[in-house]
Amino acid sequence: MKIALDVMGGDHAPQAPVIAAQNAVKTFDDIEITLVGHEEEIKKYLTDTSKITILHTTEKIEDTDQPTTAVRRKKDSSMVLAMREVKEGRADACISAGNTGALMTAGLLYVGRIPGIDRPALSPMLPTMNGKGFLLLDVGANMDAKPEHLLQYAIIGNTYMEMVAKRKQPRVGLLNVGTESGKGNELTKAAFPLLEAANFQFIGNVEARDLLSGVADVVVCDGFAGNLVLKSIEGTAGTLFSLLKKEMTKSIKNKLAAGVLKSDLQGLKGKLSYSEYGGAGLFGLKSPVIKAHGSSDETAVFHAIRQAREMVDQQVVTIIKNEVSKLKKVEE
């Protein structure tokens, strides 16, 4: 299989994605990677061209660009060219750490939606205390949602967790302000019976305070609520380690304690880090499209490549398509 990697997006471009690509082709013998970006810059970090090709361009979409306008006007940008590799059948999946809105727009324009999916969801794996993580759909692709959209997200999330994360009978939860079935706003109240009647393990409403304890494997919500949860988790984790660092360097006694606990603290930091989980999938498109975190280092990009590979290998898009078509038949 071949993966198109936009190497011009993100804070550590192009170094991090180029290094990650080389590590990935050494680790997985069944993939080839097309690096899309400025050839001269890429070659500064490319030491092994085995199973790696370069698609040269000097144009990129900036984080400050207006997504729709940028995708339409910058047709030779690294992100758009990577997406076209998928559209025209030269790649099976696409990865970028660039402008999220532009990636969503390009995905819809060039790859297209799976029939029966009204709105794709931006869906990251987020950390839990047991180290397994959970999938949150949606975290900002669509700020407003309808009950049937949440049902589609649940089907997508359940399929992904079964096929890629290898969870048997994933627990699907509906993000809400209480666990009782009658709680919530009009959206969650209407979505609850749809999820309850679906062919997956729906565990009911789940509260935000329980997410990191691993209460569910898949959590569905509208993009507004999901983005608040995502930013809260990222901010809390960052603040927690800043506070710990400050306390551990306050005195000689604390510094000695920090030296003893260093490996344990690094393990804890790893559990709360996004880098081991890959990127956020733009689920609901006809081919795998992965949005890597903007601050992704080579480890995070490597795991995004691993994630894309597993989605292609396990035919996740085809299975989602089949599950959604069953849903449509039931509705008819």
Image (cartoon, helix red, strand yellow):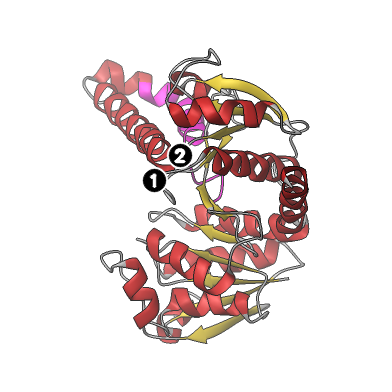
Local crowd at mark 2 within 10 Å, few (<14), some, or many (≥20)?
many
Amino acid at pointer 1 = Met
The residue that appears at 56% across and 31% down in the rendered structure is 191
User: Is residue 117 visible in this depiction of the protein?
Assistant: yes
Tell me, yes or no, whether the highlighted magenta stretch contains residue 265.
yes
| Residue where numbered disc 1 is placed | 143
Tell me, yes or no, whether the highlighted magenta stretch contains residue 268.
yes
Q: CA distance from mark 2 to mark 1?
A: 6 Å
Q: Position of residue 101 (x, y in %)?
A: 39, 60
Local crowd at mark 1 within 10 Å, few (<14), some, or many (≥20)?
some
Q: Which one is nearer the viewer's eye here, 115 or 44?
A: 115
The majority secondary structure of the magenta stretch comes to helix
**The label number, if any, that marks residue 222 in the structure image:** 2
Local SS, label 2: loop
Q: Which residues are magenta?
A: 258-279
Whether pointer 2 and pointer 1 mark residues with C-beta atoms closer than 8 Å, the reply is: yes
Q: Position of residue 40 (x, y in %)?
A: 42, 86
Local SS, label 1: loop
The answer to which image quadrant residue 105 occupies is bottom left
The answer to which image quadrant residue 220 occupies is top right
